[in-house]
Amino acid sequence: TARNPHEPEFHQAVHEVLHSIAPVLDRHPEFTGAGIVPRLVEPERQIMFRVPWVDDAGRVQVDRGYRIQFSSVLGPYKGGLRFHPSVNLSIIKFLGFEQIFKNALTGQGIGGAKGGSDFDPHGKSDAEVMRFCQSFVSELYRHLGEHTDVPAGDIGVGVREIGYLFGQYRKITNRHESGTFTGKGVQWGGAEVRTEATGYGVVFFAEEMLSARGTSLEGLRVGVSGSGNVAIYAIAKAHELGALPVTASDSSGYVVDDDGIDVALLRQIKEVERARIAEYAARRPSARFVEGGRPWEVAVDVAIPAATQNELDEADARALIGNGVRAVAEGANMPSTPAAVAAFQASDVLFGPGKAANAGGVAASAFEMSQNASRQRWSFDESERKLRAIIADIHASARDAAERYDRPGDYVAGANIAGFERVAHAMLAQGVI
Ligand code: NDP
């Protein structure tokens, strides 16, 4: 805390991992001897930079850019970019730290990083977003590369932003190095299923947890928060697997639709019109909008928080438990507060932490890197099959690690331990660097 003051989200993420891995360190004194933990909590490199750009009114704007390259022990740095006014060093560090273990869990040879800016894309014109992205990458490009650091999307960064970032990268490096960004459009180097992967993956993870208990998603009511990339495709896949997703939200409130969220309408409002969620209820007779609320007061069997960190607190968890929720699969990163996680774990609720449950996005990014490197294209069906297999594998690794350390059914401990073991063994083998 003294070394990293004013970084509450980073402390929260580190505390959770250290708590889980304490028994691993007891069993492996060589990890302590090699200083694995003190090295892991210190990023390999932290880049912070000025991002000046000119808005449509001709005024100069200055935002702050970040890229935290946390660990490259398993492969090139990999992790998304977030553009949101709340972005600060603590948030990017917590995301980068979590990314190390998530990426290790996928078994795909990718290191951990995260980046972004406090730039707010809401209400900006396309031209402003483009100029911002060009300025951002004009500084960051020198730290990127397909063997060095490969950014992707996150909050506020979708295929439009990746396009502008990649275009400027290509121009100033004079290299069409597709593998330097993932989340590209499928027509220009992107991969099938990358857009859908995080949302699909979180639903596959929920299905894995339920099936380990001999049940399935079929016929269950699902509550989703957010209405961005992760939420939209979680809702779509929940429908496909026979469940009924009934909520979606944004920072203005949530909608509940007992007929099931209409994915085409949601996509039109959010992806095409970039409008607010209230618009969904305005156009859909079976839905109503609850201003300023969070969807956790709605009775559901499965909850999928897919907006942002700490969006589901202890009171929300108790409301969900009171309404009989059976499973929670985190689409966002660290959306449940520590007290909410404790409440779920103290009850009989299956709890899949983001590190494991939302790893489908980065797994599909690694598919995109493979296709860029080999100049191959995989079909949608093949990519989805591979995604599903990776999620099943992550679920099995987390479950197995939890059992080996006498925490059966504890996916938080299991995911942290399984990811940590892979990283720690590699750090040990590669020496003190
Ligand atoms: P998007 O920008 O596409 O969507 C984010 C959604 O969450 C929007 O509906 C947004 O509403 C809402 N939201 C964001 N911040 C807040 C806030 N402070 N309070 C309330 N609502 C908020 O982002 P993604 O869907 O890509 O990301 C969502 C979460 O999933 C993040 O935690 C991200 O880290 C995580 N994630 C994403 C991956 C990906 O592949 N995209 C991979 C793994 C994890 P509004 O428009 O009103 O801000």
Image (cartoon, helix red, strand yellow):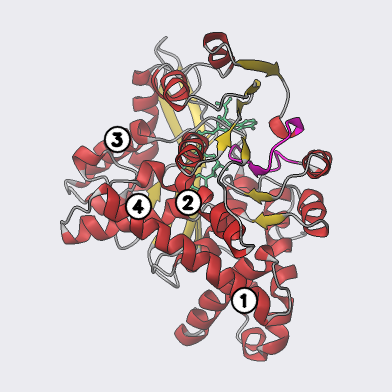
Q: Nearer the viewer, mark 3 or mark 1?
A: 1
Q: Nearer the viewer, residue 358 or 74?
A: 358
Q: Which residue is mark 1?
A: 401
Q: Residues within 10 Å of mark 4 (few under 14, many from 20)?
A: many
Residue 2 in view: yes
Q: 179 left or right of 305?
A: left
Labels 2 & 3 near each other (Cβ < 8 A) = no
**Measured Cα–Cα span from mark 3 to mark 1:** 39 Å
Residue 145 in view: no
Q: Which residue is mark 3?
A: 163
Q: Nearer the viewer, residue 366 or 328?
A: 328
Q: Position of residue 333 (x, y in %)?
A: 60, 48
What residue range appears in magenta?
Answer: 297-312
Residue 201 got which mark?
A: 2
Query: Tag 4 or tag 2, which sits nearer the N-term?
Result: 2
SS at mark 2 in the image: helix
Query: Tag 1 or tag 4, which sits nearer the N-term?
Result: 4
Mark 1: C-beta under 8 Å from nearest atom of ligand 1: no
Query: Tag 2 or tag 1, which sits nearer the N-term?
Result: 2
- Name the residue: 40% across, 12% down: 58
Say what amino acid the circle numbered 4 marks: Glu
**Measured Cα–Cα span from mark 2 to mark 3:** 24 Å
SS at mark 1 in the image: helix
Labels 3 & 1 near each other (Cβ < 8 A) = no
Q: Which residue is mark 4?
A: 384
**Measured Cα–Cα span from mark 3 to mark 4:** 23 Å
Q: Residues within 10 Å of mark 2 (few under 14, many from 20)?
A: many
Residue 283, compared with residue 261, is above or below; it is above
Query: Tag 3 or tag 2, which sits nearer the N-term?
Result: 3
Say what amino acid the circle numbered 3 marks: Gly
Say what amino acid the circle numbered 2 marks: Gly
**Measured Cα–Cα span from mark 1 to mark 2:** 20 Å
